[in-house]
Amino acid sequence: MARITAGVATSHVPAIGAALDLGKTRQDYWAPVFRGYERSKRWIAQNMPDVVFLIYNDHASAFSLDIIPTFALGCAAEFAPADEGWGPRPVPTVEGEPELAWHIAESVIQSDFDLTIINRMDVDHGLTVPLSLLFGQPLAWPCRVIPFAVNVVQYPPPSGNRCYQLGKAIRAAIESFDADLNVQIWGTGGMSHQLHGPRAGHINEAFDRRFLALLVTNPQALARISHTDYIREAGSEGIELVMWLIMRGALDEHVNEIYRFYHVPASSTAVGHIILENAERR
Ligand code: DHB
Ligand code: FE
Protein backbone atom coordinates (compact mmCIF):
# COMPACT_ATOMS: atom_id res chain seq x y z
CA MET A 1 0.00 0.00 0.00
CA ALA A 2 1.09 3.59 -0.54
CA ARG A 3 1.99 5.34 2.68
CA ILE A 4 2.46 8.94 3.81
CA THR A 5 5.82 9.15 5.53
CA ALA A 6 6.29 12.85 6.15
CA GLY A 7 4.89 16.33 5.77
CA VAL A 8 6.75 19.44 4.70
CA ALA A 9 5.52 23.01 4.93
CA THR A 10 7.24 25.99 3.40
CA SER A 11 6.60 29.53 2.21
CA HIS A 12 6.64 29.94 -1.57
CA VAL A 13 7.76 33.55 -2.10
CA PRO A 14 8.32 34.12 -5.86
CA ALA A 15 11.41 36.30 -5.27
CA ILE A 16 13.12 33.23 -3.77
CA GLY A 17 12.73 31.49 -7.13
CA ALA A 18 14.06 34.57 -8.94
CA ALA A 19 17.06 34.76 -6.55
CA LEU A 20 17.88 31.13 -7.33
CA ASP A 21 17.32 31.44 -11.08
CA LEU A 22 19.45 34.61 -11.28
CA GLY A 23 22.32 33.21 -9.18
CA LYS A 24 21.82 35.53 -6.19
CA THR A 25 21.66 32.92 -3.43
CA ARG A 26 24.96 34.07 -1.87
CA GLN A 27 24.02 37.71 -1.65
CA ASP A 28 23.75 39.06 1.91
CA TYR A 29 19.99 39.42 1.64
CA TRP A 30 19.36 35.89 0.37
CA ALA A 31 22.08 33.75 1.97
CA PRO A 32 20.26 33.32 5.33
CA VAL A 33 17.12 32.15 3.50
CA PHE A 34 18.91 29.49 1.49
CA ARG A 35 21.04 28.45 4.48
CA GLY A 36 17.77 27.67 6.25
CA TYR A 37 17.05 24.93 3.69
CA GLU A 38 20.44 23.21 3.66
CA ARG A 39 19.44 20.79 6.39
CA SER A 40 16.15 20.09 4.56
CA LYS A 41 17.98 19.28 1.33
CA ARG A 42 20.14 16.74 3.15
CA TRP A 43 17.06 15.26 4.85
CA ILE A 44 15.12 14.83 1.64
CA ALA A 45 18.12 13.33 -0.20
CA GLN A 46 18.05 10.60 2.46
CA ASN A 47 14.26 10.33 2.53
CA MET A 48 13.42 10.66 -1.14
CA PRO A 49 9.69 10.17 -1.78
CA ASP A 50 8.31 8.50 -4.87
CA VAL A 51 5.54 11.08 -5.01
CA VAL A 52 4.94 14.49 -3.44
CA PHE A 53 1.30 15.50 -2.99
CA LEU A 54 1.89 19.25 -3.19
CA ILE A 55 -0.74 21.64 -1.84
CA TYR A 56 -0.35 25.18 -3.14
CA ASN A 57 -2.34 28.04 -4.51
CA ASP A 58 -2.44 29.25 -8.07
CA HIS A 59 -1.86 33.02 -8.21
CA ALA A 60 -4.07 33.81 -11.24
CA SER A 61 -1.65 31.89 -13.52
CA ALA A 62 -3.63 28.78 -14.54
CA PHE A 63 -6.96 30.16 -13.30
CA SER A 64 -8.37 33.67 -13.40
CA LEU A 65 -11.43 35.36 -12.02
CA ASP A 66 -13.36 33.50 -14.78
CA ILE A 67 -13.06 30.14 -13.04
CA ILE A 68 -12.13 29.71 -9.36
CA PRO A 69 -12.08 26.12 -8.09
CA THR A 70 -11.88 25.83 -4.31
CA PHE A 71 -9.92 22.56 -4.44
CA ALA A 72 -8.33 21.46 -7.75
CA LEU A 73 -6.56 18.12 -8.16
CA GLY A 74 -3.95 17.77 -10.88
CA CYS A 75 -4.54 14.45 -12.69
CA ALA A 76 -2.36 15.13 -15.74
CA ALA A 77 0.85 13.32 -16.70
CA GLU A 78 2.82 16.57 -16.65
CA PHE A 79 2.55 20.20 -15.66
CA ALA A 80 4.63 22.94 -17.30
CA PRO A 81 6.04 25.91 -15.35
CA ALA A 82 3.69 28.88 -15.81
CA ASP A 83 4.64 32.17 -17.43
CA GLU A 84 3.96 34.66 -14.64
CA GLY A 85 4.88 37.69 -16.70
CA TRP A 86 8.64 37.28 -17.18
CA GLY A 87 8.56 33.96 -19.05
CA PRO A 88 8.37 30.56 -17.34
CA ARG A 89 10.97 29.85 -14.62
CA PRO A 90 13.93 27.80 -15.98
CA VAL A 91 12.91 24.72 -14.00
CA PRO A 92 11.99 21.22 -15.17
CA THR A 93 8.48 20.25 -16.19
CA VAL A 94 6.70 18.56 -13.32
CA GLU A 95 5.97 14.90 -13.87
CA GLY A 96 2.58 13.88 -12.42
CA GLU A 97 1.22 10.57 -11.12
CA PRO A 98 -2.15 10.20 -12.90
CA GLU A 99 -3.03 6.77 -11.56
CA LEU A 100 -2.70 7.78 -7.92
CA ALA A 101 -4.30 11.16 -8.63
CA TRP A 102 -7.41 9.53 -10.13
CA HIS A 103 -7.59 7.14 -7.20
CA ILE A 104 -7.47 10.14 -4.84
CA ALA A 105 -10.20 11.85 -6.89
CA GLU A 106 -12.46 8.83 -6.58
CA SER A 107 -11.80 8.24 -2.90
CA VAL A 108 -11.95 11.87 -1.73
CA ILE A 109 -14.98 12.85 -3.82
CA GLN A 110 -16.85 9.74 -2.66
CA SER A 111 -15.92 10.79 0.90
CA ASP A 112 -17.96 13.96 0.41
CA PHE A 113 -15.20 16.45 -0.52
CA ASP A 114 -16.01 17.82 -3.96
CA LEU A 115 -12.81 18.36 -5.95
CA THR A 116 -12.30 19.90 -9.36
CA ILE A 117 -10.41 17.53 -11.65
CA ILE A 118 -7.68 19.23 -13.66
CA ASN A 119 -6.33 17.58 -16.81
CA ARG A 120 -4.22 20.51 -17.97
CA MET A 121 -2.58 23.16 -15.82
CA ASP A 122 0.60 25.22 -15.77
CA VAL A 123 2.08 25.52 -12.28
CA ASP A 124 3.33 28.82 -10.86
CA HIS A 125 5.73 29.86 -8.08
CA GLY A 126 3.37 28.44 -5.45
CA LEU A 127 4.45 24.97 -6.59
CA THR A 128 7.85 25.46 -8.22
CA VAL A 129 9.53 27.54 -5.49
CA PRO A 130 9.03 24.84 -2.80
CA LEU A 131 10.45 22.24 -5.23
CA SER A 132 13.48 24.48 -5.82
CA LEU A 133 14.01 25.04 -2.09
CA LEU A 134 14.07 21.32 -1.30
CA PHE A 135 15.62 19.93 -4.49
CA GLY A 136 17.84 22.78 -5.74
CA GLN A 137 18.41 23.07 -9.48
CA PRO A 138 18.33 19.55 -11.00
CA LEU A 139 17.82 18.86 -14.71
CA ALA A 140 14.72 16.84 -13.81
CA TRP A 141 12.74 16.83 -10.54
CA PRO A 142 13.73 13.70 -8.60
CA CYS A 143 10.18 12.51 -7.89
CA ARG A 144 6.68 12.75 -9.28
CA VAL A 145 4.33 15.46 -8.04
CA ILE A 146 0.55 15.65 -7.73
CA PRO A 147 -0.41 19.34 -7.69
CA PHE A 148 -3.37 20.30 -5.50
CA ALA A 149 -4.46 23.92 -5.89
CA VAL A 150 -6.53 25.66 -3.20
CA ASN A 151 -8.35 28.95 -3.68
CA VAL A 152 -6.96 31.44 -1.18
CA VAL A 153 -6.94 34.32 -3.67
CA GLN A 154 -10.60 35.21 -4.18
CA TYR A 155 -12.97 35.44 -1.20
CA PRO A 156 -14.31 33.11 0.13
CA PRO A 157 -11.47 30.68 0.79
CA PRO A 158 -12.19 27.32 2.44
CA SER A 159 -12.11 27.27 6.25
CA GLY A 160 -9.10 26.00 8.14
CA ASN A 161 -11.21 23.24 9.61
CA ARG A 162 -12.43 22.14 6.17
CA CYS A 163 -8.81 22.00 5.06
CA TYR A 164 -7.75 20.01 8.11
CA GLN A 165 -10.56 17.47 7.59
CA LEU A 166 -9.75 17.26 3.87
CA GLY A 167 -6.21 16.27 4.80
CA LYS A 168 -7.63 13.24 6.60
CA ALA A 169 -9.63 12.23 3.52
CA ILE A 170 -6.55 12.62 1.32
CA ARG A 171 -4.60 10.43 3.69
CA ALA A 172 -7.26 7.70 3.59
CA ALA A 173 -7.22 7.90 -0.19
CA ILE A 174 -3.46 7.61 -0.50
CA GLU A 175 -3.26 4.79 2.01
CA SER A 176 -5.87 2.77 0.14
CA PHE A 177 -3.89 2.90 -3.12
CA ASP A 178 -2.53 -0.52 -3.92
CA ALA A 179 1.08 0.26 -4.80
CA ASP A 180 4.25 0.39 -2.75
CA LEU A 181 4.80 4.16 -2.82
CA ASN A 182 6.48 6.50 -0.37
CA VAL A 183 4.36 9.66 -0.46
CA GLN A 184 5.14 12.98 1.18
CA ILE A 185 2.55 15.68 1.63
CA TRP A 186 3.66 19.29 1.32
CA GLY A 187 1.74 22.42 2.30
CA THR A 188 2.98 25.75 0.95
CA GLY A 189 2.36 29.47 1.35
CA GLY A 190 2.43 31.79 4.33
CA MET A 191 3.58 32.73 6.76
CA SER A 192 2.30 36.19 7.70
CA HIS A 193 2.30 38.62 4.79
CA GLN A 194 0.20 41.25 3.10
CA LEU A 195 1.09 42.34 -0.40
CA HIS A 196 -1.16 45.38 -0.87
CA GLY A 197 -3.28 48.03 0.80
CA PRO A 198 -2.42 50.24 3.78
CA ARG A 199 -0.99 47.32 5.76
CA ALA A 200 1.29 46.06 2.92
CA GLY A 201 4.39 44.52 4.49
CA HIS A 202 2.52 43.43 7.64
CA ILE A 203 4.37 40.65 9.48
CA ASN A 204 3.43 39.07 12.83
CA GLU A 205 6.31 37.02 14.17
CA ALA A 206 4.52 36.10 17.42
CA PHE A 207 1.56 34.68 15.46
CA ASP A 208 3.85 32.77 13.10
CA ARG A 209 5.95 31.21 15.85
CA ARG A 210 2.82 30.16 17.73
CA PHE A 211 1.41 28.66 14.51
CA LEU A 212 4.60 26.63 13.98
CA ALA A 213 4.49 25.32 17.55
CA LEU A 214 0.80 24.41 17.49
CA LEU A 215 1.12 22.80 14.08
CA VAL A 216 3.19 20.13 15.80
CA THR A 217 1.30 19.71 19.07
CA ASN A 218 -2.26 20.94 18.62
CA PRO A 219 -3.35 21.43 14.98
CA GLN A 220 -7.00 21.20 16.09
CA ALA A 221 -6.54 24.59 17.78
CA LEU A 222 -5.23 26.06 14.51
CA ALA A 223 -8.17 24.59 12.61
CA ARG A 224 -10.47 26.89 14.61
CA ILE A 225 -8.80 30.14 13.41
CA SER A 226 -11.32 32.11 11.34
CA HIS A 227 -10.66 33.92 8.07
CA THR A 228 -10.94 37.30 9.73
CA ASP A 229 -8.43 36.29 12.38
CA TYR A 230 -5.96 35.21 9.68
CA ILE A 231 -6.35 38.58 7.99
CA ARG A 232 -6.16 40.52 11.24
CA GLU A 233 -3.19 38.62 12.63
CA ALA A 234 -1.28 37.33 9.62
CA GLY A 235 -2.23 39.80 6.88
CA SER A 236 -4.43 39.26 3.84
CA GLU A 237 -2.07 36.68 2.28
CA GLY A 238 -1.53 34.96 5.65
CA ILE A 239 -4.68 33.03 4.74
CA GLU A 240 -2.35 30.83 2.65
CA LEU A 241 -1.60 29.06 5.94
CA VAL A 242 -4.85 27.07 5.68
CA MET A 243 -2.95 24.96 3.14
CA TRP A 244 -0.55 23.86 5.87
CA LEU A 245 -3.58 22.42 7.69
CA ILE A 246 -4.38 20.08 4.79
CA MET A 247 -0.84 18.74 5.12
CA ARG A 248 -1.12 18.41 8.90
CA GLY A 249 -4.51 16.68 8.66
CA ALA A 250 -2.92 13.99 6.49
CA LEU A 251 -0.34 13.12 9.17
CA ASP A 252 -0.55 11.17 12.40
CA GLU A 253 -1.87 12.93 15.47
CA HIS A 254 1.62 12.49 16.95
CA VAL A 255 4.48 13.54 14.71
CA ASN A 256 8.22 13.89 15.11
CA GLU A 257 9.48 17.34 14.33
CA ILE A 258 12.59 16.93 12.21
CA TYR A 259 13.36 20.56 11.50
CA ARG A 260 11.97 24.08 11.85
CA PHE A 261 13.12 27.35 10.25
CA TYR A 262 11.81 30.90 10.48
CA HIS A 263 13.22 34.00 8.83
CA VAL A 264 12.01 37.57 8.24
CA PRO A 265 11.83 38.87 5.61
CA ALA A 266 12.03 37.47 2.12
CA SER A 267 10.40 40.04 -0.13
CA SER A 268 7.25 41.01 1.81
CA THR A 269 6.94 37.72 3.60
CA ALA A 270 7.85 35.88 6.78
CA VAL A 271 9.45 32.61 5.64
CA GLY A 272 8.42 29.57 7.66
CA HIS A 273 9.39 25.96 7.09
CA ILE A 274 8.86 22.76 9.02
CA ILE A 275 9.44 19.04 8.43
CA LEU A 276 7.29 16.50 10.28
CA GLU A 277 7.53 12.73 10.18
CA ASN A 278 4.73 10.37 11.13
CA ALA A 279 5.45 9.00 14.60
CA GLU A 280 2.83 6.28 15.03
CA ARG A 281 3.83 2.79 13.98
CA ARG A 282 1.28 0.95 11.91
C1 DHB B 1 5.02 37.29 -2.21
C2 DHB B 1 4.63 36.21 -1.43
C3 DHB B 1 3.71 35.29 -1.90
O1 DHB B 1 3.25 34.21 -1.19
C4 DHB B 1 3.21 35.42 -3.18
O2 DHB B 1 2.37 34.47 -3.64
C5 DHB B 1 3.59 36.50 -3.96
C6 DHB B 1 4.50 37.43 -3.48
C7 DHB B 1 6.02 38.28 -1.71
O3 DHB B 1 6.38 38.25 -0.54
O4 DHB B 1 6.50 39.05 -2.52
FE1 FE C 1 1.53 33.14 -2.37
Image: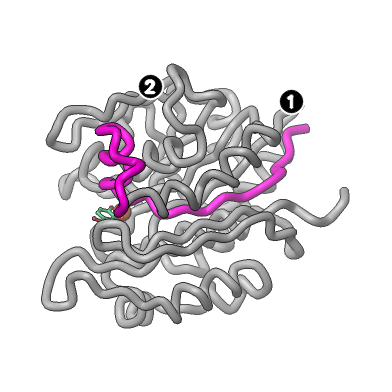
Which SS class for mark 1?
loop
Q: Which residues are magenta?
A: 1-29
Mark 1 touches mark 2? (CB < 8 Å) = no
Q: Residue at x 39, y 40 (%)?
A: 127
Measured in 3D between alpha carbons, the distance from the residue under mark 1 to the one under mark 2, in whole angstroms, is 24 Å
- Tell me the residue that label 2 is attached to: 93
User: Residue at the location (43% across, 43% down)?
Assistant: 130
- The one nearer the camera, 154 or 17, is 17
Q: Amino acid at mark 2?
A: Thr
Asked which quadrant contains residue 157, the reply is bottom left
Q: Secondary structure at mark 2?
A: loop
* Residue type at the position of mark 1: Ala
Residue hosting label 1: 179
- Quarter containing the N terminus: top right
Mark sitting on residue 70: none
Residue closest to the far right: 282
Membership of 172 in magenta stretch: no
The percent coordinates of residue 12 (x first, y second) are 37, 49
Display coloring: one colour
Q: Is residue 71 left or right of residue 182?
A: left
Seen from the viewer's position, the closer of residues 193 and 153 is 193
